[in-house]
Amino acid sequence: MAATDWIRPEIQALQAYAVPDATGLIKLDAMENPYPWPATLKTAWADRLRQVALNRYPDPHAAEVETAVRHTFGIPADSAILFGNGSDEIIQMIALALASPGHCLLSVEPGFVMYRMIALSCGLDYVGVPLRSDDFALDRDALLTAIAQHQPAVIFLACPNNPTGNLFAADDIAAVLRAAPGLVVIDEAYAPFTATSHLPQLGQYANLVVMRTVSKMGLAGLRLGFLAGPADWLDNINKMRLPYNINSLTQTSAVFALQHHAVFCAQAAQICAERTRLSIALTALPGITVYPSDANFVLIRTPPQQAARWFNHLQQNGILIKRLHGTHPALHDCLRLTIGTPEENDAVLQVLQTMH
Ligand SMILES: Cc1ncc(COP(=O)(O)O)c(C=O)c1O
């Protein structure tokens, strides 16, 4: 008896999500905030953690986290809220709730790879609609045609988009919301680095939900994401949530961190300033295209056939970035660099400026 006799063919066809080993390297591959907490904050946080009763199960509703999140991010009072062990888990809960023969999850490409992977693993079909190849904007006609044809149970749009970094035009998103027969998830994972948000639009559309994470603002290790939107959707998606999915240490840490949200906002502002500086400096390299970004990373296109060489050269010099070349036809010669500290960004520039 072999595993292949039993594992579903679509699971066998998937590749597990790969995380490269970054030991000893400057880690600019995963959109993490590079700044640690000030020492005083760490001490106060440790004091809080000492009081956590690890012998007890966590609050199943994460009520204190909910109060803090509603207050910090201004979630409309009439919107429901649902927490996940990272927003990845929320994508999975949505897919599990909507999976049914003939149902599909629709998103855009190049986009966040987990939408496809989670859809297929949960038994939902997946449809990827290409973005415009010149500027990675939504191709409204292609999207509306695909929506009419496939009648997706759910549409995911990351705004800003990963790995391209751009926002989508508000009127294109509104057209999708009007045309969608099912749920529309606006994934705002990169919200700390842009002024644009769809949270204020909650309640204006019966099928709009907004997904956020605390990962990119500087709490990737906590694994906490949330979904806000109409109760009729969230109450049902919540049935897919495993009991106690948000552990006690995460709940206590998140409440503490959100009491110090200003620290993270200041760090995000530094990251945005570095994004501008790095983008301008990269633009000066011969033959490079630097795409505009509203996130904490930049997408670049190297001169033809150079992506592997640049990636390897950076790695040999102790810097890990994300190689996108080969992952999607629209990402030919592309690399993605997470914005680091000024010193880390200087190290990137120094390696790239001296390799010609
Ligand atoms: C667009 C997008 N959504 C969701 C996630 C997942 O975030 P989390 O750490 O909350 O699982 C990522 C992570 O890279 C992302 O890029």
Image (cartoon, rainbow, N blue to C red):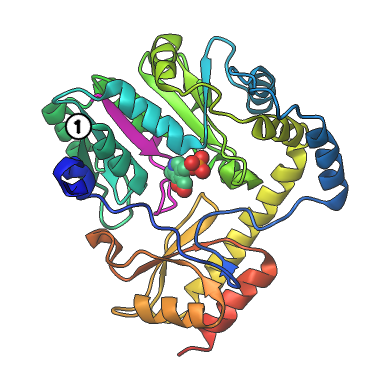
Query: Along the line of sight, which residue is nearer the eye, 71 or 38?
Result: 38
Look at 43% across and 15% down and name the residue there. 204
Residue 332 part of the magenta-drawn span: no
Q: Is mark 1 within 8 Å of ligand 1?
A: no
Asked whether, in this view, residue 45 is left or right of residue 315, the answer is right
Q: Quadrant of the C terminus?
A: bottom left
> In this picture, which residue range is highlighted in magenta?
153-170
- Whether residue 7 is situated above or below residue 287 in the rendered picture: above
Find residue 259 and report its horizontal and vertical position in percent.
77, 31
The answer to whether one can see residue 160 in this image is: no
In which quadrant of the rendered view does residue 148 lie?
Answer: top left
- What residue is disc 1 on? 144
Q: Quadrant of residue 335?
A: bottom left
Dominant secondary-structure state across the stretch colored magenta: loop
Left or right of 335? Residue 191 is right
Task: Name the residue at 41% across, 49% down.
Answer: 162
- Residue 165 drawn in magenta: yes
Which class describes the residues within 10 Å of circle 1: few (<14), some (14-19), or many (20+)? some
Which residue is more in the foreground, 122 or 216? 122
- Up/down of 303 relative to 71, above or below: below
